[in-house]
Image (cartoon, rainbow, N blue to C red):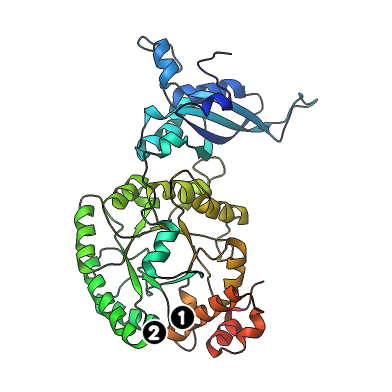
Amino acid sequence: MDEKLYVLPETAKGKELVIATYYIDLPYSVDIVKKAEALAVGQTIGTWVPIPGITDEIRDKYMGKVVNIFDVPVRELEPDVAPERAAYLIQIAYPAANFGTDFPLMITSLLGNDASTSAQVKLLDIEFPEGFLKNFQGPRFGIEGVRERFGIQERPLLLNMIKPCTGITPEEGAKIFYDVALGGVDLIKDDELFGDPFYSKPEERVRAYKDAARRAAEKTGEEVKYFVNITGGFSDLKEKIERVEKAGADGLMVNFSVMGYSALKYISENTSLPILGHSAGAGMVCEGALNGMATPLAVGKLARIAGADIVMLNTPYGGYPLRKQKYLQTCSALTLPLGHIKATMPSIGGGVHPGIVEKYIGEVGKDIVLAAGGSIQGHKMGAAAGARAMREAIDIACSGKDFVSEAEAYPELKEALSRWGYVK
């Protein structure tokens, strides 16, 4: 074996090497060893053809190295009858010096050069060395900081999004904001489809919605916080951040799936506000079985490292056919210890209603944001009643008491359960 092309995991972890794990499916006749070598070389020094200028020093310092090749399923012996295809897990170690803290170059290095390598792979995970992670700030607030900033401990936060998604002026949206705020939600955000249209500029929404929040607080005693959507082009991003901050925004919403991790990192480093990262559109990166990235990496780990304090993610219960293990693994990628990087708060969205609150808390704990849309604004007794039903469901679920029997005491919650049911 060429020692410049191969490395054991123990040795790789002692160096500034980023280890990427891939899934690949090939005709059985293809030599997987040669394919892995081509991936390691092609994604780093860039060519399988010997050319002048590639020295031993370059190969030693900057070429990728094969760490592991695993058969899926495990196969130690040649079969009597060869199958048509075979699947493998490949681990490649990449010198971090090749891309540094540049997210676009990192993803290009780990995934983007398949025309040269002829390897259609799905990137399952990236293992970052501790020294490399120190170059990233990560979330400014994280779970603990979000709770402290908004003064909410020991229960999930309740989030609503303004509906209709588009087509409303700041004044029209403020009326909806006011009605929802009366019911006791903690946070209200723009829908991910509502950005910077000519009829509703972000800073105008901030002023109108914050006025509605103050008026509602005079009745409830609690001022709802507003996350404004600043997703858009990069040319006026810094100016847009300054405008909404000056107008009084409580937080920023960024769709990192389309803006990119580098944009999210830039925003995190250039604002003093918490950031809610939205993953709308992540399906085009994650849904392919033989290409793209796995959901826990694309929506979880990378968004956390880039600086999202809260991340909106899908679950298997809202109509989107996400596998349960992917939703749970994404929550883990956001919250489990990761060097100095703070934990990001998962925001559960899609089909959230009072009858499923206990299930979510039971599966992923209380350090979550419950993002309820239609179940609040579509409540038969009005938006304020829909919000109260969600808060009542949260309080009962956190108390540990029998949910169904306790719900009988709350008319708004009973109405919600009669319409959307109770999910065990």
Tag of residue 203: none
Q: Which residue is mark 1?
A: 387
Instruction: Tell me: 263 left or right of 114.
Output: left
Q: Disc 2 marks which amino acid?
A: Leu
**Decide: marks 2, 1 in contact (CB < 8 A)?**
yes
* Disc 2 element: loop
Q: Nearer the viewer, residue 44 or 193?
A: 44
Residue 339, placed above or below residue 150:
above
Q: Nearer the viewer, residue 109 or 343?
A: 343
Q: Residue 270, percent across and down?
A: 26, 52
Q: Residue 297, percent across and down?
A: 50, 46
The N terminus lies in quadrant: top right
Instruction: Tell me: 72 left or right of 236.
Output: right
The part of the image, by quadrant, that contains residue 107 is top left
Q: Residue 61, percent across and down?
A: 42, 19
Does residue 263 appear anywhere in the picture? yes
